[in-house]
Image (cartoon, helix red, strand yellow):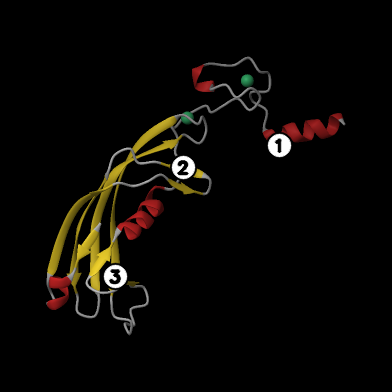
């Protein structure tokens, strides 16, 4: 989404609002994949604070991700607020500010960074997800698989193998 800041830049103390939906491609982070089946809502405003511009937005949507224990596909809603400082002044001393050129700014990458910050975590399909059997890979939420090592701690398993050798 490109936000046109021409009018805003002319008047200190002014504010422009934007309200948009954004298609977000699948994101990969630390080996996990996050996909967004529906467009993400982004609405907020940019305020001309004189030396810098202040971008504030509310972001919401839903995420498709795999349960980290059983790998089942799950969907979770998310919503968060983001807050950034922007400047097109190369001489600006606002170190945290995101630089842009001219009178327009493309905010997709800024929003995507915030989506990653707020959604890249481990998800569970339910608090008591039993996960997959480490021996046969069966989904233990659907019943016991019959393997004998169900309750064996993987570290003990290594020790057992060492003792057998
Ligand atoms: Zn699960
Ligand atoms: Zn099994």
Q: Earlier in the sequence, mark 2 or mark 1?
A: 2
The label nearer to you, 3 versus 1, is 3
- For mark 1, what is the residue? 155
* Vertical comparison of 95 with 144: above or below: below
Looking at the picture, how far across and down is residue 9, in whole percent?
Answer: 17, 75
Give left or right: position of 70 versus 44.
right
Q: Nearer the viewer, residue 18 or 127?
A: 18
Q: Residue at x 51, y 29 (%)?
A: 70
Judged from the image, the quadrant occupied by ligand 2 is top right
Q: Residue at x 78, y 35 (%)?
A: 159
Answer whether residue 126 is visible to the viewer in this image: no
Give left or right: position of 78 versus 47.
right
Q: Quadrant of residue 105?
A: bottom left
Give left or right: position of 149 versus 6.
right
- For mark 3, what is the residue? 85
The label nearer to you, 2 versus 3, is 2
Q: Nearer the viewer, residue 8 or 61?
A: 8
Q: Earlier in the sequence, mark 2 or mark 3?
A: 2
Q: Nearer the viewer, residue 160 or 142?
A: 142
Dot 2, how many residues are within 10 Å of its Cα: few (below 14), some (14-19), or many (20+)? Answer: few
- For mark 2, what is the residue? 33
Q: Quadrant of the N terminus?
A: bottom left
Q: Is mark 1 within 8 Å of ligand 2?
A: no
Looking at the picture, how far across and down is residue 144, in whole percent?
Answer: 57, 16
Dot 1, how many residues are within 10 Å of its Cα: few (below 14), some (14-19), or many (20+)? Answer: few
Q: Secondary structure at mark 2?
A: strand
Q: Residue furthest bottom?
A: 91
């Amino acid at each position: 989404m490109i936000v046109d800041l021409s009018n805003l830049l002319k008047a200190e103390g002014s504010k422009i609002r934007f309200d948009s939906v954004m298609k977000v491609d699948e994101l990969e982070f630390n080996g996990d994949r996050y996909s967004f089946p529906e467009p993400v809502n982004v609405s907020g405003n940019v305020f001309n604070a004189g030396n810098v511009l202040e971008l504030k937005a509310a972001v919401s949507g839903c995420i498709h991700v795999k349960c980290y224990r059983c790998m089942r596909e799950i969907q979770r809603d998310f919503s968060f607020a983001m807050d950034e400082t922007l400047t097109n002044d190369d001489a600006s001393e606002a170190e945290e500010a995101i630089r842009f050129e001219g009178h327009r700014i493309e905010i997709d990458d800024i929003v995507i960074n915030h989506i990653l910050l707020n959604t890249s975590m481990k998800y569970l399909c339910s608090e008591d997800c039993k996960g997959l059997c480490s021996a046969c890979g069966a989904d233990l939420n659907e019943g016991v698989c019959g393997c004998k090592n169900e309750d064996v701690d993987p570290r003990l398993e290594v020790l057992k193998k060492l003792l057998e050798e």
